[in-house]
Amino acid sequence: MTTQQLVNEIRKKKSFLCIGLDVDLTKIPQHLLKEEDPIFAFNKEIIDATHHLCVAYKPNTAFYEAYGLKGWKALEKTINYINEKHPEIFTIADAKRGDIGNTSTMYAKAFFEDLSFDSVTVAPYMGKDSVEPFLAFENKHTIMLALTSNQGAFDFQTKTIEGKELYKQVLETSKSWKNSENLMYVVGATKAEYFSEIRKIIPNSFLLVPGVGAQGGNLQEVCKYGLSENIGLLINSSRGIIYASNKNDFAAAAAKKAEELQNQMAEILN
Amino acid sequence: MTTQQLVNEIRKKKSFLCIGLDVDLTKIPQHLLKEEDPIFAFNKEIIDATHHLCVAYKPNTAFYEAYGLKGWKALEKTINYINEKHPEIFTIADAKRGDIGNTSTMYAKAFFEDLSFDSVTVAPYMGKDSVEPFLAFENKHTIMLALTSNQGAFDFQTKTIEGKELYKQVLETSKSWKNSENLMYVVGATKAEYFSEIRKIIPNSFLLVPGVGAQGGNLQEVCKYGLSENIGLLINSSRGIIYASNKNDFAAAAAKKAEELQNQMAEILN
């Protein structure tokens, strides 16, 4: 998917909501555990109930890998279902990968080719030659961690490195990498005051923003400082939506939560 | 496996060699492609031919994920084969994972419980609460990236952050994390002159050292500055060993290369 197609979809749906499909078998409605593939059964109902309200889905690979082969199969079925039923929806493999050159290419193939995701999240610690292999894939997007929403972000990311915080160095440096137009960035909503600084470095790049809702981030604040000309934001909510209820009505409850966020987004876009 | 068990094994075998099982289907002997599971078939022969020469095996997960479900199955079969046949060998899932708290726990479960690896590699960018969930597992080891062997290591890792290079900050900071005795670190062999500095910060921790051989690192140099009282080094070689030949004799050729390294190690240990 091209960035322009994503922007068009946002304008059409009046939504820049991304729903995180982080399926924990201890949290889903217990009746689903009788299904042959409870993870996919859960995702399918969530997708059926929410696809008109969001522009992106983001399975975090940890939740699939934890269930081994069955989990990987559920991930494959989930991405295939989205791509077949809703090809207009942007898909993010939240995998936070990163390795040396040829090994990064293997990861890129795993997510862009084998699983046909539109994008994958990556970690910046190993630098340019660990990220450029992902950027080489046309119409695929690489979403690099910049400033994350957890407490540990203050351990290294906000420390000053040669006169500038590490996360700013990461943003700045990555602009010179080959095919950097395929880069997006992860910036946590819990640090809304940082968005205006970030926009000075990357005025137009898309930002994937976790931390609204469960982690306490504020949508209005993030939009105030983070919106760009082409919108440039994907706001993610996972637990706040998919675990709105753990009863039979879980899909409807998820849709209700998603709609609340989408309504706020429509207002902001108007 | 406890660290002491690993040290005992090193002394017994006179080897601190780790063999990287990074299986690329375009590089293995073509006759194996007829097998039902060519990746596992390759690994099985390599393991059968080299297990007496090394103390650790390290599959890099990228090479398995790139082949989707089949790849994940091959990874599962490989770790099960090692654990059944050679439980004394230390196993490393080279996955370079890292995520927010509860999600890191899911990754830890994937590698420590579902796949029963002794250790997993992680990335430090997201800080303390992304790594501590891994450290909570008893007799499991978390190998954190410190100074990697690629060119991109100079993008951020060696930059000065509050008076000290980032990789040193990472080493220093991680010492205060809960259960930090379960930490090991990745330090590339291509930067041998850094080892004496690193040993000042972490005198006894085990270091996983890639980059000997194919990437140009020198074993003697690394040992000169990197050996600790309890040895404290695992030297990894992947391509240099497993792709020594792509003919029918590939396993014997791999054993020969492994033996060359093991002989050098035995000499150093004497």
Image: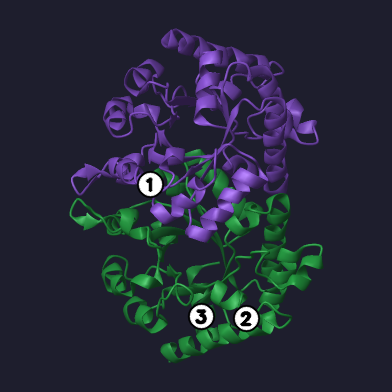
Chain colours: A green, B purple
Q: Earlier in the sequence, mark 1 or mark 2?
A: 1
Give the secondary structure at mark 3.
helix
Query: Do the residues under discs 2 and 3 have CB atoms within 8 angstroms?
Result: no
Q: Nearer the viewer, residue A166 or A112?
A: A166
Amino acid type assigned to the residue bearing label 2 in the image: Ala
Q: Position of residue A50 (x, y in %)?
A: 63, 80
Q: Is residue A179 visible?
A: no
Q: Which residue is mark 3?
A: A10
Q: Which residue is mark 2?
A: A254
Crowd rating for badge 1 (residues with CA inside 10 Å; few <14, some 14–19, many 20+): many
Image quadrant in which you'd find residue B242 = top right
Q: Chain of mark 2?
A: A
Amino acid type assigned to the residue bearing label 3 in the image: Ile
Q: Chain of mark 1?
A: A
Between the residue at mark 2 and the residue at mark 3, the CA separation in whole angstroms equals 20 Å
Crowd rating for badge 3 (residues with CA inside 10 Å; few <14, some 14–19, many 20+): many
- Residues flagged by tags 2 and 3 on a common chain: yes
Q: Position of residue B118 (x, y in %)?
A: 58, 36
Between the residue at mark 1 and the residue at mark 3, the CA separation in whole angstroms equals 31 Å
Q: Is residue B91 left or right of residue B203?
A: right
Amino acid type assigned to the residue bearing label 1 in the image: Lys
Give the secondary structure at mark 1.
helix
Give the secondary structure at mark 2.
helix
Q: Which residue is mark 1?
A: A128
Residue A221 drawn above or below residue A198: below
Q: Is residue B6 visible?
A: yes
